[in-house]
Amino acid sequence: MLYRFIIFCVLVVISIRVVAQSEQPFNYRDFSALPAYGTPALSPDGTKVAFVQNVTSPEELSMLATYDFKEGEKHFLLKTDNEKVHINWYKWVNNERLIVSAVYQSRRGRTKVKDTRLLSVRFDAGGKGVFNLIHWKRLNSRAGNPTHTPQFQDEVIDWMPNDPEHILISIDAEVLGLPSVYKVNVNTGGLSRIVRGKKGIRDWITDRQHNVRIGVSLDYDTGEREVLLKDGDNWKTLFSYNAMTEKGEYPMGFALDPNILYYRGYKGDFKAVYKLNLKTNESTEVYSDDGYDVNGSLIYSPLTNDAIGVRHDGRHYWDKRYVALQKGLDQSLPDYTNTLVSFSDDEKTYLVYSESDTLPGVFLLGNRDEGQLDVLFHQYSQIDTSKLSPHKLISYKARDGVSVEAYLTLPKGEGPFPTIIHPHGGPGARDFSGFDYWTAYFTSKGYAVLRPNFRGSQGYGYSFAQSQMKGWGLTMQDDITDAAHWMVEQGHAEKDNMCIVGASYGGYAALMATVKTPNLFKCAVSFAGVSSLKHLVLSARRFLNNEFVKNQIGDDFDDLEARSPYYNAEGIKTPILLVHGEEDRVVRVRQSRYMRDELDDLDKTYKYVELENGNHFLSIQRNRHRLFQEMDEFLNTYLTK
């Protein structure tokens, strides 16, 4: 009863938006627009909210802002055009200041990389409004004047909520790749070293009392990993395994009780959450999901400081208070997936993100004392939701009999439909239900979409995920081919009216489809796709994880060439659209340039588009619009409605 009036308001808002836009012509820019707002965060006292707002006029900018509910004042703190720097994340550290992670393009020698920095930002930009939290000269002197500058400077390992002036960070100030733990004053930038890097430890974990208790070591050459527990002046091994070749355990964090450690281990072939009593060495299963991995991080209560759940398929709680709140939200908003994203310290004020396959995301402000929810932000208010379609989780049989899950989205009307096979990136990722702006764009154009979670995808167990090891272009690719055949067999698609569209690994899969199945697709779109596995492996030699890359992709050059579109382009018959960001630091732009040159030499049908200053994540608004513009024209040319 408490939520009925507010829910009615939410539905009325959505209904008004649909009616108002139902007669508007289709415009790809409605879908390629950046979301209007980034995920908001409440201040500890719940009186203010921080958020990133994306604007297009008079300039295309992302702006970090705060809003004071009591005073009714909005403050703009930072702005970026996302060309060289973009805001990675932000979090309140006390009621006056936020800590902001900024990512920017840089070089290490001749190698283009990404660097991160921490900014301390006052909520109203007054006084010492914004400053770089890690003062390098100061840190350099504390660290003994090393010759390198740490690349990643934003790893906060403890927010120390009971000490609003300090945080703990992990940073490799002394030795490259071997981080120490520093205590940093968020108001002044003053710092002191708590623990010096040692024993090959790459990650540090504190308990809820802010003591450094766990170190996770990793040998980048061999893959050997140890989880170490501080025991007085010594460190003892809790778990050890080879991270390249074996299942293993990984610490997630402590309970309020400093003798209880949560960790992720395996229940058969699937990851589950366990807790370990460090006094008795007894392990207990906390949560598992039959047939799926539990991959998310722990959720902590700001009121009790204890672990209350895990981020998995939204949120899963074991704290009864949160179970009741989540149940109430889901009963009140039954057609949506409702995720609690932020709380005040007293847990009376909270933020909820609600979305569905056909609702492009709404942030709601809740108050437990008043028992109400208010609409805060819409993500994509310009999208005509009457044209969106629900996703259906299906399972199809691959050629070897293995069941593969996929999300099927059909447009309005009767099939068969022109069809998009849309493999995800990663490949160690997966697709989910919920709003997806690519899929919404495709189905609003009248295309059917199938997003297969092919072998190598995350979340389906260790054996399923291991298919990606030296498996690019093999069984993983066959699963995508079999998905296309399933669409035809089920009557959803016409066999001569399908295209394949993917980004990152999905771009590789799209290109590889034109090699392995040259007659299956009418066209292929690759954004930021890999074309040469050999060059991918060669480029990894400059990085610490070189051996991990070779373990995943392979190191036999003949085999790598056999599984690379670039080396097998002669037989391609399918028209290809290649799009790549000029400054992509994840998949280098040369991957698409190589493919362009080869297609050109072979007189194949293709179009190449390079996005100025573009990155791997389409953070720049004009580049996202350009990709969708090119894709829109390309699909209109080759798919028949």
Image (cartoon, grey):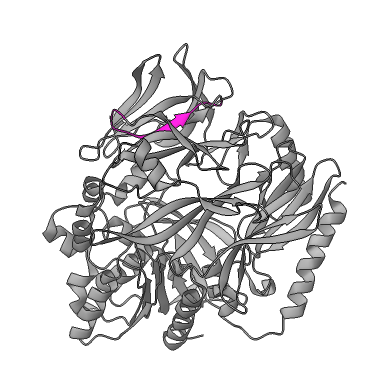
Note whether 608 is above or below 194 in the view shown.
below
Residue 315 part of the magenta-drawn span = no
Note whether 145 is above or below 498 in the view shown.
above
Q: Residue 628, how many percent across, how many down?
A: 48, 78
Residue at 54% x, 27% y: name it: 286
Q: Residue 328, how many percent across, how many down?
A: 77, 43
Q: Can I make out residue 264 in this image? A: no
Question: Residue 204 or 93: which is nearer the viewer?
Answer: 93
In magenta, the rendered stretch is 198-208
Residue at 32% x, 66% y: name it: 508
Residue at 36% x, 31% y: name it: 216
Q: Residue furthest top?
A: 280
Question: Residue 292 or 281: which is nearer the viewer?
Answer: 281
In the shown orientation, is residue 163 left or right of residue 463? right
Note whether 193 is above or below 148 in the view shown.
above
Note whether 21 is above or below 394 in the view shown.
below
Q: Residue 229, how many percent across, how many down?
A: 39, 21
Q: Can I make out residue 130 in this image? A: yes
Question: Residue 11 or 374: which is nearer the viewer?
Answer: 374
Residue 360's quadrant in the figure? bottom right
Residue 213's quadrant in the figure? top left
In the shown orientation, is residue 298 left or right of residue 18? left
Number of callouts in the render?
0
Q: Residue 10, how many percent across, how many down?
A: 79, 61
Residue 613's quadrant in the figure? bottom left
